[in-house]
Image (cartoon, grey):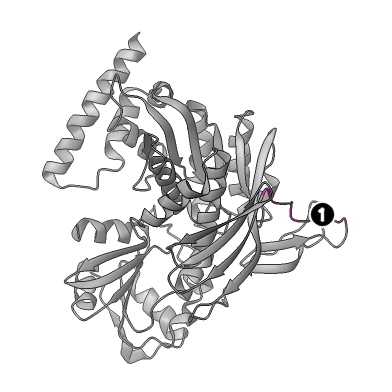
Amino acid sequence: MINKLKFYLSLITARCAYLGIKLLNRSSGTSFAGMLVLKICPDFLKFCSKYIKKRIVTITGTNGKSTTSGLIAHILETAHQNVIHNLKGANMLTGVANVFALNIRPFRRFDYAVIESDEAYLSKLYDYMRSDYLVVTNLFRDQLDRYGELNTTAEFIKNAIDKNPDLKLVLNADDPIVATFNRTKYAVYYGFENVEYKCTYEHKSNAPSEVFNCDCGEELKYSKQFFAQQGHYYCPKCGYKRPECNYPANVTIYDDYSVINIENRGISFGFKINLAGLYNAYNALAAISFGFECGLNQEEIQKALDSYHAIFGRTEKRIINGNPAVIQLIKNPTGASEVLKTVDLKSNIVIAINDNYADGRDISWLWDSDFEQLKNAEKLVITSGTRANDMATRLKYAGIAQEKIIVEPNIKKAIDKATMNGKTTILPSYTALLKLTKENK
């Protein structure tokens, strides 16, 4: 009874705190209310589970969590389901608690919860809230100061899965680490059989890819390698290979969209995805596969894909100072290299890099990212953020003409300088994205 009173007290406190934040315009309000409710009621998330009538869906992985979870939530909403979702990407416990604290009501229930979770916090989330589904996108090297090596991140996710034995998994078969997570009774796989490019940009990348060994100790080889470690791998020694997909697909990549043909129970279905790049095609394939798992049909899923709009720095399109801008979050070598392939080299370019805790203090990843893709940039390339000088140095070694590089540590000034003169591509790290979002509402 006492805990229940704490729960309701925390809800009231959260609403008051959020109103105060908005009135004072002090922050984006994606985590503060969540921090408060967890202080008042540490078991807050346990109480939240009863507000979900059908299923709780969690999404994790290094790259693509926000886009994949956004697509899944939008597919469900378009199919007339009532969904609660941490839309703005705050994916630690405070962020998850925040979205529940500001949206649930004593007599209001949701059909689905779609929760994006940080890899390292997934196990902690499962201590309070059991999930029906877990969708895993990929595992790439990311923020070594927070996550350590890839096997450490993989153990975080495996530990979470072990806490939830009835969990249903939707796994990326093309990722050799993710494919090994089938530790429960039910797992389905999605992946690409073939990738075809009909885009004008260079789709090859010089970014380094990881080398993985089979459990027998032999290095995995590839018959097809799409990007980084994503592809068709096999062990020449013991015969282990990429698992058969429940949802195999072929994809054709165009400049601003992709066409995916996916097989579901022996029948092929075509989908158009209005997002650029192979990395987004993987995100869409994960969401489509989940949609089929929930029993939705092609028409329902395509309707959602047609009306989906990227948000919060994931191929986000805005008008800033009267001119079009595309915002693409970059945060690790693989993700950055895939984004850099799609940059419009005729646009002004702003690269804003911070080294705050949420970004990762270690910025060595800049040297493993394929910034050489920008060497033919036609206009200004402005570096900004706390590591503006480091970024400028990296661009110099990438072969970008010195006279095109401008260092402007103040993010607002950098954005204003670029967007006053035509289209701009903005590539921020996470906290730089938060800052430009707050200042360009």
Q: Which amino acid lies under the numbered mark 1 shown in the image of this protein?
A: Tyr
Q: Position of residue 136 (x, y in %)?
A: 57, 47
Q: Residue at x 46, y 61 (%)?
A: 273
Q: Residue furthest top?
A: 1
Residue at 50% across, 78% down: 199
Task: Estimate the x, y position of residue 72 in percent, counting from the top left.
Answer: 46, 45
Residue 381: which quarter of the image? bottom left
Is 150 left or right of 388, judged from the image as shown? right
Give percent across and percent down for residue 370: 51, 76
Q: Residue furthest left?
A: 23
Say if 24 sits above or below 127 in the image.
Answer: below
Question: At x 57% / y 78%, what residue is drawn?
Answer: 204
Callout 1: few (<14), some (14-19), or many (20+) C-alpha neighbours within 10 Å? Answer: some
Majority secondary structure in the magenta region? loop
In the image, taking residue 400 as reference, residue 36 lies left or right, namely left
Q: Secondary structure at mark 1?
A: loop
Magenta-highlighted residues: 238-246
**Residue 208 in view of the camera:** no
Residue nearer the viewer, 11 or 383: 11
Answer yes or no: is residue 36 visible. yes
| Quadrant (top left, top right, bottom left, bottom right) of the C terminus | bottom left
| Residue topped by disc 1 | 240
**How many discs appear?**
1
Q: Quadrant of the N terminus?
A: top left
Left or right of residue 328, residue 292 in this image:
right
- The quarter of the displayed image where residue 81 is located: top left
- Whole-percent x, y for residue 262 in the image: 61, 56
Say whether residue 37 is magenta: no
